[in-house]
Image (cartoon, grey):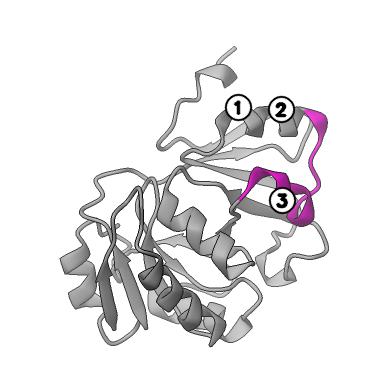
Amino acid sequence: MEFYELHPVTPQLRYINKAIEVMREGGVIIYPTDTVYGFGCDIFNRDALERIYTIKNESTTKLFSFIISDFKDIATYAKVSDYAYKTMKKLTPGPYTFVLPAAKEVPKKLWTKRKTVGIRIPNHNIALTLAKELGNPIISTSVTNRKGDVLFNPEEIRVVFNTQVDLMLASGALEGTPSTIIDLSGDTPEIIREGAGDISMFMV
């Protein structure tokens, strides 16, 4: 596994470009977000997606969310109501995953049975730059060990996944918690998982 340390605010573009090249060739990377480290690949590369299922020891029925680089692109990948649009506008970028009706451009492998998808716009320059420079959304699923424990320390992650992942972009230890998941696919919002991020606006 290639391993590079990046500045979290002004990430070195040469390392970003190495990660982009890996993903374009169907590889799997590890990268930091505003919550935890994530496994990533191009959402349109089915083989790379299957590799992540294997690495995480997850059933292929488990659904992964994905990161987009810019809020203006949201309508490309999801059907967004006026309420959902206004809500997301207030909370992005940030530590939230939004469940929305899927647009046809998203691979059906990432759809729930209800035809929804999970979308993130994290407040982290490395993650956003990766998606922007790749030109496609990237898978976002937390780096966990075989027991399902989230790993925060990049050196530990490097040891555990050295032979399973092609490249890692590190940016120090992340002591965050997973993102809050908010379902905006219906008429009223539903908190699916309370994690990082303020949800007081939903506490009426």
Query: Where on the picture, by quarter, is residue 84?
Result: top right
Residue that appears at 57% across and 69% down:
134
Q: Rounded to the nearest whole Å, what is the CA distance between mark 2 and mark 3?
A: 15 Å
Could you say which disc has been placed on residue 86 in the image? Answer: 2
Residue 189 relative to residue 95: left or right = right
Where 41 sits versus 163, above or below? above
Q: Residue at x 45, y 42 (%)?
A: 123
Q: Which residue is mark 1?
A: 90
* Residues at marks 1 and 2 touching, judged by CB atoms closer than 8 Å: yes
Q: Residue at x 21, y 55 (%)?
A: 172
Could you tell which of marks 1 and 3 lies nearer the N-terminus?
3
The residue that label 3 is drawn on is: 73
Classify the position of the C terminus by image quarter: top right
SS majority, magenta: helix
In the rendered view of the protein, which quadrant contains the N terminus? bottom left
The reply to whether residue 62 is visible in this rendering is: no
Please provide percent x and percent y for residue 128.
Answer: 50, 54
Identify the amino acid type marked 1: Lys
Which disc, if any, is residue 30? Answer: none
Q: Which residues are magenta?
A: 70-82
